Amino acid sequence: MIYKITSLFIFFIMSFTLSAQDINKEDTRLLSKPARSDSKIAFIYAEDLWVANKNGSSPKRLTVDDGIESNPVFSPDGSLIAFNAEYDGNTDVYVVPADGGVPERLSWHPGNDLVRDFTSDGSAVLFASQRSVFTNRYTKLFEVSVSGGQVKELKIPNAFWADYSEDGRYIAYTPLYEVFNQWKYYRGGTASRIWIYDTNDHAVTEIPKPENGSNDTRPQWLGDKVYFRSDRNGEFNLYSYDMDSKEVSQLTNFEDFPVLDLSAGKDKIILEQAGYLHTFNPRDNSNNLSST
């Protein structure tokens, strides 16, 4: 059986054969966890890490291990990809050159260490972990150098998703894990919210919510805006928060399937929806999605 990931020119040969008329080469989905640099995209397919040019051409499979890979993030210069892998019984932090190579393990704790971002200078990987919390309801943020070594704990009390602003001054983060994955349209006390932490004075502000509540999650910085996914108007869609005007804007209008993940990189947003990867260009100030 042969598949081609839409616009990515990737073929997978399976252990059995179908006639040509039974093969759909244009509509393979299941692409997840996208990331974007200036020239490449990264994503997970069949629990392995792949990269391709930003237009979807020249794909390359970077991992072939039996373990599960997830959460790829490009370094600011695009030369490295940090990602999670379950190679030794738990989830750890790894980095690999974006052009391919041998992954290097950076974290060694027996618990799960979840990749979130690089620091703004690209010298360290930001990750969430339960290694120093008193209950498994929380995770905290840590950094580890791309060359390995001692792990640094950040001063934010607890956080799940997190992303650095381009200048490193702010961290947009969600304090709690995502309860809404179990209850759609959840509006209880642990509804997901996004806080913006100032590393200079430790002040925290929250992205405003509508009166009827919402789940706001997966924050990503691009310029002076935080992009995130939210169910404030029904299904999860892409939104932005302007740091200057303090306004929240809805950018996509999916009604059939939610926006499941997103990543900002070099002036564009790449997002996952209905198994496809889409590119959103904020400069056009419109719902100008294109398939990757």
Image (tube, rainbow, N blue to C red):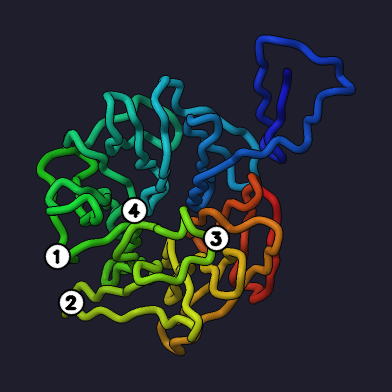
Contact (Cβ within 8 Å) of mark 1 with mark 2: yes
Find disc 3 in the rendering and name its residue.
269
Disc 4 to disc 1: CB gap under 8 Å: no
Q: Is residue 275 above or below residue 286?
A: above
Estimate how packed mark 3 is, as few (under 14), some (14 to 19) or many (20 or more) residues with alpha carbons within 10 Å.
many
Quick one: 202 or 52, which is closer to the camera? 202
Mark 2 vs mark 3: in front: 2
User: Which comes before the other along the chain, label 2 or label 4?
Assistant: 4
- Horizontal arrangement in the rendering, residue 31 relative to residue 214 (left or right): right
Q: Which residue is mark 2?
A: 202
The disc placed on residue 155 is 1
Q: Earlier in the sequence, mark 2 or mark 3?
A: 2
Work out whether mark 1 precedes mark 2 in sequence or the reverse, and give the earlier one.
Answer: 1
Dot 2: element: loop
Report which quarter residue 283 is drawn in: bottom right
Label 1 sits on what residue type? Lys
Nearest to viewer (mark 4 / mark 1): 1
Find residue 66 and report its image quarter: top left
Q: Residue at x 27, y 48 (%)?
A: 125
Vertical placement of residue 61 versus 240, above or below: above
Q: CA distance from mark 2 to mark 3?
A: 28 Å
Q: Which residue is mark 4?
A: 117
Q: At which x and y percent is residue 249?
A: 56, 79
